[in-house]
Image (tube, coloured by chain):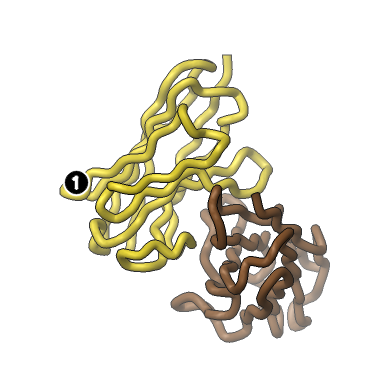
Amino acid sequence: QVQLVESGGGVVQPGRSLRLSCAASGFTFSNYGMHWVRQAPGKGLEWVAVIADDGRDKKHADSVRGRFTISRDNPKNTLYLQMNSLRVEDTAVYYCAKDRAVAAAAYDFDSWGQGTLVTVSS
Amino acid sequence: EIVLTQSPATLSLSPGERAILSCRASQTISNKLAWYQQKPGQAPRLLIYDASNRATGIPARFSGSGSGTDFTLTISSLEPEDFAVYYCQQRSTWPGITFGQGTRLEIK
């Protein structure tokens, strides 16, 4: 079955960088768009970024554009989120999520990882 | 940006009762709406996509309806495991995918 396992979270000071990873298994990773979605403590869900199945097309939310970059390594079945210039308001659980549709992205999410917590604090 | 407004914020019901959750979009989104369930300490789970299609493995007591700006998630007869937070999500237009603020379904 589909498995998504995030890693790389932790405590980081404002202005610093962090890279999250998401290891995927149980499906043909290179056939699906992938997303990052975050959830601040006690709050709702916020979509962060999407990357197409071949990695060529990427989109980022306004709140992170210019600071975060989504990428993927299809031979390694791994999704990444490079987070630079981190802010206190980026504190959240970060989930990687698989797009529901093959090839043409549906932009909804049928499988999720367990999440990794990023805490930005001085 | 399209804003999704969910109501009520909290819904208190008993097992066996019918639950009706609402999601209203600030502009028309056709049928490009999904519903998710999230339990404490867990990742969200996709229930409904394209407004009315049940995701794989989702019980038939969950149903979705609506188009344009007004959408509904109905749980026909609540089971104990259905008490959770429910989010709607739109994928209609860029600049972005947005979620509603959530409805907490609690045991009365």
Image quadrant containing the C terminus of chain A: top right
Residue B63 seen in this snapshot: yes
Give how far across and how far down residue A114 sits, in percent: 45, 50
Viewer can see residue A96: no
Quadrant showing the N terminus of chain A: bottom left
Label 1 chain ID? A
Q: Position of residue B61 (x, y in %)?
A: 62, 84
**At 80% across and 63% down in the image, what residue appears?**
B7
Q: How many marks?
A: 1
Relative image position of residue B95 (x, y in whole percent): 55, 48
Q: Residue at x 70, y 58 (%)?
A: B4
Q: Is residue B87 left or right of residue B55?
A: right
Q: Which residue is mark 1?
A: A76
Chain B visual colour: brown
Q: Is residue B24 left or right of residue A78?
A: right
Colour yellow, chain: A
Residue at image point 25% right, 52% down: A54
SS at mark 1? Answer: helix
Amino acid identity at mark 1: Lys
The crowd level at tag 1 (other Cα within 10 Å; few <14, some 14-19, many 20+) is: few
